[in-house]
Image (cartoon, rainbow, N blue to C red):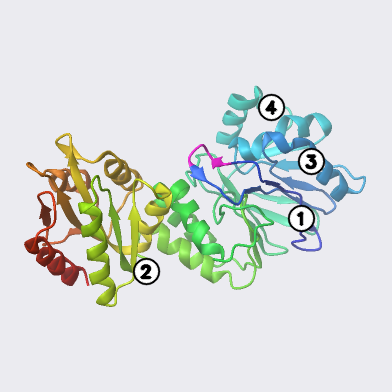
Amino acid sequence: MDITITNDIKYIGVDDHDIDLFEGLYEVEHGMAYNSYVILDEKIAVMDTVEARFGEEWLGKLDAALSGRTPDYLIVQHVEPDHSANITAFMKKYPNAAVCASAQAFKLIANFYGTDYADRRVVLTDGATLELGRHVLNFVTAPMVHWPEVVMTYDSTDKVLFSADAFGKFGAQDYDDPEGWACEARRYYFGIVGKFGVQVQGVLRKLMGKELNAICSLHGPILTGHLSQYLSLYNTWSGYAAETEGVLVAFTSVYGHTAEAAHYLAEQLMAAGKRVSVMDLARCDEYEAVEDAFRYSKLALCTTTYNGGVFPTMRTFIEHLTDRGYQKRTVAFVENGGWAPTAAKGMRAMLEGMKDLTFAETSVKIMGALTPANFAQLDALAKELA
């Protein structure tokens, strides 16, 4: 796509429409963008490279943007290979260019590409600047957002933040998402960055007070307009606060009885005016379920006892939550077990180490098929959650 950010900042990224799983985990039905940018000034800086398969296409776009000029700097904000795979090709093609990155990044560059470019490198530290002429670049270290070497770059001239993976989303540049930025950005955030909320909060504090006209992530669209909405959502997500007052009802079911209970609970909650999402953990995109667990203020976990413990897909789902620091929510349990139900005890044990969780007083225990007493328990649980 032909994208111009400002008069001096050009987009030279690529779209990947062949990828099915991003990082081998996340379904990306609408592709993925690997974003790269070039700043044209008295000196020229290239912001990151792209995934290995698109090296020739990327270098061609860079050549077109340069119009016969030669770049002075390659700024490596993030060494994950979908952004750094063409460092070697770039440095070979432009032997007089310097590579700029954090000290930790150069260690990773050596690990991935066999050299740390000791004779051609500029080590970036927090608060360091680089003058290109009219443009002055200010560097903000962002360790663990979401790798330890990450650096963001703020162009104080055009008021553009190059944010590395932060503020990214799933989907190619040419995908016009009818749901807007937040939906796939939320799934992206909680899947990939969600564990590192404390570190994201630290970077947001560093960015406070900076005037922003655009945010240029390494994935997804260039963000312009009312940027406060994106910053506000990142503050909410990284602070583990609920974005939406509502309930995720997540369930697994073997013979349909636990599914019946989950859907009945959801119906009672909706009748009470609550916003509700229902996820069958055996069939849904598991990271959509993770996204909703962090989005909503309450969570109802409905599952069967299996091998004396928690049903496998439910156990995996809870592990996804605990791995990402799930907190500040209300959690309810609905268990099923034909002769020895233990799932609620197991789910609670998995979650008890999390901070600021409130467990619902009402717990529903099903012994096979639902009974009138079970429906009464579900009514009581819906009332408590509502």
Q: Earlier along the polypeptide chain: callout 4 or callout 1? A: 1
Q: CA distance from mark 4 to mark 1?
A: 35 Å
The x and y percentages for residue 386 are: 22, 72
The x and y percentages for residue 383 are: 17, 72
Q: What residue lies at 56% left-to-right and 63% top-to-bottom? A: 181
Q: Which residue is mark 2?
A: 244
Q: What residue lies at 71% left-to-right and 48% top-to-bottom? A: 36
Q: Earlier along the polypeptide chain: callout 3 or callout 2? A: 3
**Residue 324 in the figure: left or right of residue 94:** left
Q: Earlier along the polypeptide chain: callout 1 or callout 3? A: 1
Q: CA distance from mark 2 to mark 4?
A: 49 Å
Badge 3 element: helix
- C-beta proximity under 8 Å, tags 3 and 2: no
Q: Is residue 312 visible?
A: yes
Q: Which residue is mark 3?
A: 57
Callout 1 crowding tier (Cα within 10 Å): few <14, some 14–19, many ≥20:
few
Q: Which residue is mark 1?
A: 1
Which contiguous range is marked in magenta? 20-25
239 is within the stretch colored magenta: no
Whether 217 is drawn above or below 271: the answer is above
Nearest-to-viewer mark from 4 and 3: 3
Q: CA distance from mark 1 to mark 3?
A: 12 Å
Badge 4 element: loop
Q: Which residue is mark 4?
A: 118
- C-beta proximity under 8 Å, tags 1 and 2: no
